[in-house]
Amino acid sequence: MSRIRIVGGEWRSRLIDVSTVKGLRPTPDRVRETLFNWLGQDLRGKSCLDLFAGSGALGFEAASRGADKVTMVEQDAVAFAALQGNAKTLQAARVQLVRGDALKFARSAGPSHDVVFLDPPYRAGWVEQMAPLLPGLLTEDGVVYVEAEHEIENIERLTRVKQGRAGQVYYSLFAKA
């Protein structure tokens, strides 16, 4: 098991355990710093959804910055166990962990999320499968953060408002059109 650090907020510099599940690649520190500069450092009053939570880096980062509620969805049992351990260590009362399929969860969730994090496994077509569901998950002013192995220019009914690249990671922020 490896570890990564939370870069801001209440848990700044705290280390979280990351399982060694094949294909799991936590969002790099530099990218998380940029993302939370875009979102704002203070997420109080916000509800966040971390689909394909993996390491939990994005969800724990949001909770550290005061998000009222962070729902993290992860299907892999080993990654989920690491999320549970980290939530317990951090005493993350505002974090709800859901073990299950992100696509099924998104189909049943309503438009109650201010921020949706979408960082699925690469080369599996997840962004394309999730795209039609994303606008329906958002509050009126909600945004979607997408991380992928290639540039994502369009998501139906959403407009790309920010974008970046770090090495082989492409990341974008989308808002309702």
Image (spheres, helix red, strand yellow):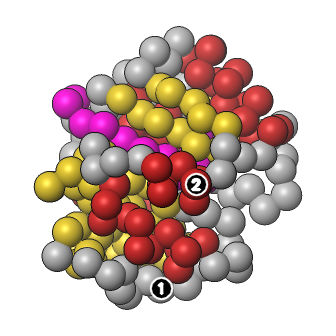
Is 133 left or right of 123, judged from the image as shown? left
Task: Please identify the quadrant where the C terminus is shown.
Answer: bottom left
Is 1 left or right of 88, judged from the image as shown? right
Residue at screen point 30% across, 65% down: 135
Does 64 appear in magenta? no
Q: Which residue is mark 1?
A: 151
Q: As rendered, which of 17 and 83 lies closer to the eye?
A: 83
Residue at screen point 74% across, 31% down: 82
Magenta segment range? Answer: 44-57
Q: Which residue is mark 2?
A: 104
Instruction: Locate residue 105, reporting x and y percent.
Output: 53, 49
Residue at screen point 31% across, 60% down: 136
Q: As rendered, which of 148 and 49 lies closer to the eye?
A: 49
Q: Nearer the viewer, mark 1 or mark 2?
A: 2
Inter-mark Cα distance, 1 to 2: 25 Å
| Number of callouts | 2
Q: Hey, what amino acid is under mark 1? A: Glu
